[in-house]
Amino acid sequence: MSTDSSNNLLRSHIAELPLAELAAREKTPFYIYDEQKIIERIRDLKAFDVVRYAQKACSNLAILNICRQHGAVVDAVSAGEILRAEAAGFSSAGDPTPIVYTADIFDRSSLELVLERGIHTNCGSPDMLIQLGERAPGQDVTLRINPGFGHGHSQKTNTGGSQSKHGIWHSELGDCLQIVKKYDLTVTGLHMHIGSGTDLEHLAQVVTAMEQAAGVVGASLKTISAGGGLPIPYEAKESYVDLEAYFQLWDASRKRLESCFGHPLGLEIEPGRYLVAEAGFLVAEIRAIKKMDANWFYLIDAGFNDLARPILYGSYHPMSIYHRKARSESVALREVIVGGPLCESGDIFTQQEGGFVCTRALPEAEVGDLLVIECAGAYGSVMGSNYNSKPLAAELLIRDGQVVTIRDRQTFAQMTAGEHSPISG
């Protein structure tokens, strides 16, 4: 095939910075984020009263700080994420609440921290209400409701319905209000989130479910949250949600509830992937090219220890090639399987859900060329591990045309710092 066929699969820059310069600065593999893209995505959602970033998508302190500086508040799902939010400058008190703890349980450390800091809680189970009420009666709380249905890009990202662990089952709302009454709690917010990477049709169903739940709770409500789940197009056949239409659905619902309750209601949205996915790139080096029967493999120095989404969900990520040596001739495409360095058969970046390996048409390359995995800013570095004793990758940020390191590449000493070998003999 001609160069024209591969042009969109060849990459020389990220956010106008030369890949050669970036690769010379940092050992591969590394993550790099485009700050401006994150800012743009926050601004996309400005019609909503509150943009609450689901930091589990990418919780680097620099990313959290960008969100804070541009008007977003934050959701935390663990004690560690509360501490991260505080380290990035978020306070525990304010209007809107800067940090909300959202979970289906209190582990002991998170309960103690929530009580110590006075963190507002979004409770996803009756037991959370009981445990909070026993220790701190009289609190304001938000309830996360499972509306009885869910939808996501994978069954593993579906957060609604009877097979999901998330939220208070919709028909148990009345029973939970009895717990609320017993401990003098006040339900000031309702939250629903049915899954990650869903579509407008399914997201719209949440609006009706929210109105029904709000009618049961009543006028104590001050805020309703549309949750997250906004998709981004990883593949050409995928698309964004019509944000204006989506907001109009929620705004109309909010106004109906305001008319019923006789006071204003805040409208929150809780994006994670939407803010950061397209901003992030995982840059790796091709270290081997090999043929296995009829299959060609590009083997890179990044593995599922760096990006787990393909092995977890069969997720598709766009990929591109950077040739270190300039080529005068046309570049043909080759059907290849892209794999990593790990001693694990599942360490394949081109696979479908269920572990079915597939090929990808990529430009012909040589050992030493770079392979860029795109749209990798969400659920990438945060799921990193030390499997095979691999270090956590460095993270870089492009800000105003300059590159700053926002996480150093992990050293072996850091990796093993908490380990202890008993003295023998």
Image (cartoon, rainbow, N blue to C red):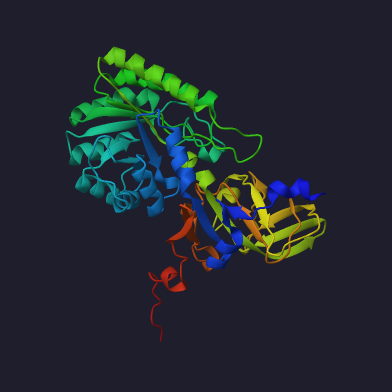
Residue at screen point 38% across, 74% down: 420
Quadrant of the drawing holding the C terminus: bottom left
Tag count in the figure? 0
Rendered view: 284 above or below 98: below
Residue 166 in the image: above or below residue 55: above
Q: Position of residue 281 (x, y in %)?
A: 55, 52
Is residue 271 visible in the rendered structure shown here? no
Question: In the depicted view, which residue is nearer to us: 12 or 183?
Answer: 12
Instruction: Name the foreground residue: 68 vs 423.
Output: 68
Image coordinates for residue 75, horizontal then vertical, percent: 35, 41
Q: Which residue is drawn at 26% across and 28% down?
A: 188
Residue 183 seen by the camera: yes
Measured as percent of width and height from the top left, residue 151 is found at 53, 31
Q: Residue at x 39, y 25 (%)?
A: 170
Q: Going by the picture, which residue comes out furthest to the bottom? A: 425
- Quick check: 190 above or below 219? below
